[in-house]
C-alpha cells in the first residue's frame, strides 16, 4: 500500500512528465529504453519505492532540479487565502490607451489563453502583476496603486504582492 508521501512524490513525477508533454511510453522512447514505462508508472502511482539515486537520475532526465520532484514537505496548515487580484475590464476600456495599452494587451492574451471572454472582470495572479510591473518599469506595489487609482484593480488587492 502506497504511503501518502509516496503518492505525493508520484503526483509530482507525473506532473513534471506531463508538463514536458510526455506519455509514459514517450519517456521510454525518449530515454531509449533507460526508463521503462511500467517502472515510471509504478513510481508515479506510489506503488514502487524510488531510490535517491534513481530520483536524481530522473531529475536529470527531465532537466529539473531534484527539489522540483519532491512534494511540498511543509506542514499542511490552513493558510490565509491570497488576496484576489481582479482587473475590471470595463474600467480598463475607459483608461487612455497610452497608459493602459500594455495592460490591455496582457489581459487580452490571458483571456485568449483561458478562453474567458465574459468581458467584465479578469482574475490575475500575483506573478501576472509582477510581469506587468516589469513591462511598466515600476515596482509591483507601485503599479498596483496606479491600477487601483485608475479604478482598474480592486482595492482589496493592496498588499497582495509579497
Image: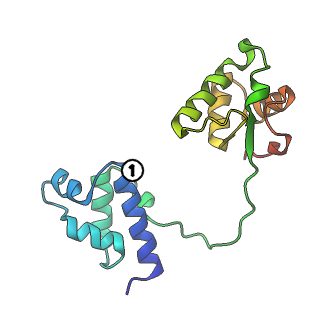
Above or below — where is 149 with respect to 59? above
Foreground residue, 96 or 90? 90
Q: As drawn, is 149 to the left or to the right of 105? A: right
Instruction: In the displayed orientation, state which residue is furthest to the front.
Output: 118
Foreground residue, 44 or 75? 44
Q: Residues within 10 Å of mark 1 (few under 14, many from 20)?
A: few
Q: Position of residue 36 (x, y in %)?
A: 18, 65
Say how the picture is coloured: rainbow
Foreground residue, 135 or 150? 150
Name the image quarter holding residue 3.
bottom left
What residue is drawn where x is 60% and y is 28%? 108
Q: Which residue lies under the disc numbered 1?
A: 19
Q: Position of residue 155 (x, y in %)?
A: 85, 40
Instruction: In the displayed orientation, state which residue is furthest to the top.
Output: 98
Q: What is the secondary structure assignment of the residue under circle 1?
A: helix
What residue is drawn where x is 41% and y is 58%? 15
Amino acid at each position: 500500500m502506497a504511503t501518502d508521501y509516496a503518492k505525493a512524490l508520484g503526483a509530482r513525477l507525473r506532473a513534471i512528465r506531463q508538463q514536458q508533454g510526455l506519455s509514459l511510453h514517450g519517456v521510454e522512447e525518449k530515454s531509449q529504453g533507460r526508463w521503462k514505462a511500467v517502472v515510471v508508472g509504478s513510481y508515479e502511482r506510489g506503488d514502487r519505492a524510488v531510490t535517491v539515486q534513481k530520483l536524481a537520475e530522473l531529475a536529470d532526465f527531465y532537466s529539473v532540479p531534484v527539489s522540483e520532484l519532491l512534494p511540498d514537505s511543509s506542514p499542511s496548515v490552513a493558510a490565509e487565502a491570497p488576496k484576489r487580484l481582479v482587473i475590471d475590464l470595463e474600467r480598463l476600456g475607459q483608461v487612455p490607451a497610452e497608459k493602459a495599452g500594455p495592460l490591455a494587451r496582457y489581459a487580452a492574451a490571458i483571456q485568449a489563453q483561458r478562453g474567458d471572454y465574459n468581458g467584465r472582470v479578469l482574475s490575475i495572479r500575483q506573478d501576472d502583476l509582477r510581469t506587468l510591473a516589469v513591462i511598466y518599469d515600476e515596482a509591483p506595489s507601485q503599479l498596483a496603486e496606479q491600477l487601483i487609482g485608475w479604478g482598474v484593480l480592486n482595492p482589496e488587492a493592496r498588499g497582495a504582492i509579497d
